[in-house]
Amino acid sequence: MRKNTIYSILLAGVAIFTTVSCSEDDLSSDSVITTDKQDKTPFDYWLDVNYVQPFNIAVKYRYEYNESDENYYTVPAQYDQAVEMAHIVKYSCIDAYIETAGMEFTCKYFPKLFYLEGEFHYRNNGTFELGTAEGGRKITLMGVNYIDRFKDNIDNLNTFYLKTIHHEFSHILHQTYEYPSSFQLITPGYLADKWSNPEFGEDYLQRGFITNYSQNSHREDFAEMLSTYLTNSQEQWDEWMKTAEGTVDDPANGRGLLEQKLDIVRNYMEETWNIDIDELRESILRREHDIVDGKINLTDLTVN
């Protein structure tokens, strides 16, 4: 209702202005409504050279109603924050896949549209969306206006942004070629939206889930397994596996279940996409550390 009300007021204002103006001036053939006309910024030219021309990827950082989810209050991405996010995605994600999987794979399968929003999508159950993937071509990345708060810490950078990109790209890959159905049979007791209930927020590792959100569905479980593995060190992964063992020393304990899942993920990526997830993780983490350590200029819009 608020959107409709504001729109009506704006239309009324235009109508009044037009009535007064017509009594004094000749009509012009040029429209006074210029909302769809945007002068190209230095950022637009940089995006042309670094996203559009090499990969045919569009990055939309201006607010567009049709790209947004009307079920949430959405906030436009701030220009400077969008510039930094585009640099981070290019260096730590796109370039990592080029290094590991090759240019042809990256050009063909990496999503062709990034839509940047300033705020996260908050749900009624106390959780919030970090990003979404649609139809194998679009990723909406949220909370861009907080990037300066999180970019200097690798855990925060992954939690709020980069893990989300790898998670959503995982969906794009398995929507293209499905992973083995045996994956969903390892821990069949998925919870749907109940995963966020307090009673399921603990001991998920011992139950064979790498994150609490993994308990939502087998598709989210698969994406969480891959994206969590790619954005964490082997030392951190080993700690989780030790925790997952609990007190039960048998192949059906949490660690055994997680290792079964990781084997399927690893084989799927190798056999379907010819990607070694250990090599990909090494590239991703090295690049993320470069960002956190300030080795990458996130504001440079120079184009050659």
Image (cartoon, rainbow, N blue to C red):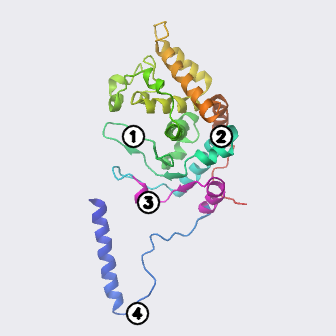
Give the residue at the far right of this rendering. Answer: 304
Tell me the mark number nearer the camera, choosing from 2 and 4: 2
Neighbor class of circle 4 (other Cα within 10 Å; few <14, some 14-19, many 20+) is: few
Give the residue type at disc 2: Ala
Q: Position of residue 194 (x, y in %)?
A: 32, 29
CB-based contact (under 8 Å), mark 1 and mark 3 = no
CB-based contact (under 8 Å), mark 1 and mark 2 = no
Q: Nearer the viewer, residue 174 or 115?
A: 174
Q: Nearer the viewer, residue 248 or 252?
A: 252
Pointer 4 or 1: first along the chain: 4
SS type, badge 3: loop
Question: Does the magenta stretch mainly form a helix, a strand or a loop?
Answer: helix
Pointer 1 or 3: first along the chain: 3
How far apart marks 4 and 3 lie (CA) works out to: 33 Å
Magenta extent: 43-68
Q: Which residue is mark 1?
A: 128
Neighbor class of circle 2 (other Cα within 10 Å; few <14, some 14-19, many 20+) is: many
Q: Please, is residue 148 above or below residue 259 in the view?
A: below
How far apart marks 4 and 1 lie (CA) works out to: 53 Å
Mark number, residue 70 = none
Give the residue type at disc 4: Asp
Pointer 1 or 2: first along the chain: 2
Q: Position of residue 231 (x, y in %)?
A: 58, 32
SS type, badge 1: strand
Give the residue type at disc 1: Phe
Q: Position of residue 251 (x, y in %)?
A: 50, 10
Q: Which residue is mark 2?
A: 96
How far apart marks 1 and 2 lie (CA) works out to: 27 Å
